[in-house]
Amino acid sequence: MVERRRRRRGPHPAYDAFYNTITANRRRIAPVPLILKDNRWRCDMDRPEAALAEPKNTLLLLCSPHNPTGKVWRREELETMAALCQKHGVRVISDEIHMDMTRSEHRHIPWSEVAQGPWALFTSGSKSFNIPAFTGAYGFIPEENERDSYLQALKGRDGLSSLPCRRWSPISPPTATGLTLDALRDYLQANMRYVADTLNNAFPALCWQPPEATYGMDRPAPAQR
């Protein structure tokens, strides 16, 4: 998959389990900081371009929508990243577990729509339908050799080798229960608007804005205050 001593790039801050998993596999992390500007998290594309050009950085680990900031990546951002990865021979793993948890004015763009080189996309119904654990997860690895390597690695892991990796049932709920998801998103958005109105009315200088995606509501970053 990725050779030892090779480095993985990814936006920062990031889900803490990414760091633990990467370092436990004796790989190094080379984070690409996100920038908070005008109450939106942004990625200065000069930074990932410089990082992806380094020969030791062989894989980009993308979280889309991003956790923990709730950023929904714009198509132009993803297309730029895809072109840079193709240019420098960097593979991509896109974690899209929060794909259904977007606000109505934002559209999630799956990596499969912009990919130009080797990639894998992993997601799950766990966030959308409260079915955590690997049995609700699924992935797409279009390149046969990469897919075979992944399945072979699974077979060597205790607790993972017997999972229904090829089962299609986790994929069907999002397409069969659109009304349920719409109702959930409406409910979450109403909660976030309530929190925003309450906080900002009590503390006008706070200027807290709901995240573009996910269901988490974190404290404002220092730059927002």
Image (cartoon, helix red, strand yellow):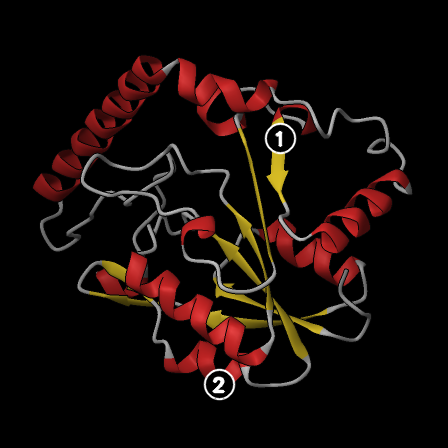
Q: Report whether residue 68 is seen.
A: no
Residue kind at label 1, given as amino acid type: Ala
Q: Who comes first in sequence, dot 2 or dot 1?
A: 2
Q: Label 1, on which residue?
A: 137
> Which quadrant of the structure image shows residue 134?
top right
Q: Label 2, on which residue?
A: 50
- The disc placed on residue 163 is none
Foreground of the two, 176 or 123: 176
Which quarter of the rendered picture does the C terminus lie within? bottom left
In this view, 195 is above or below 132? below
Q: Is residue 135 left or right of residue 66?
A: right
**Residue drawn at the location 34% of the way across and 52% of the way down:** 71
Q: Position of residue 7 (x, y in %)?
A: 68, 73
Q: Report whether residue 127 is seen.
A: yes
Which quarter of the rendered picture does the N terminus lie within? bottom right
**Residue drawn at the location 44% of the way across and 72% of the way down:** 83
Residue kind at label 2, given as amino acid type: Ala
Q: Residues within 10 Å of mark 2 (few under 14, many from 20)?
A: few
Q: Where is residue 73 in the image (x, y as percent from the top left)?
A: 34, 55
Q: Position of residue 106 (x, y in %)?
A: 24, 43
> Which quadrant of the structure image shows residue 24?
bottom right
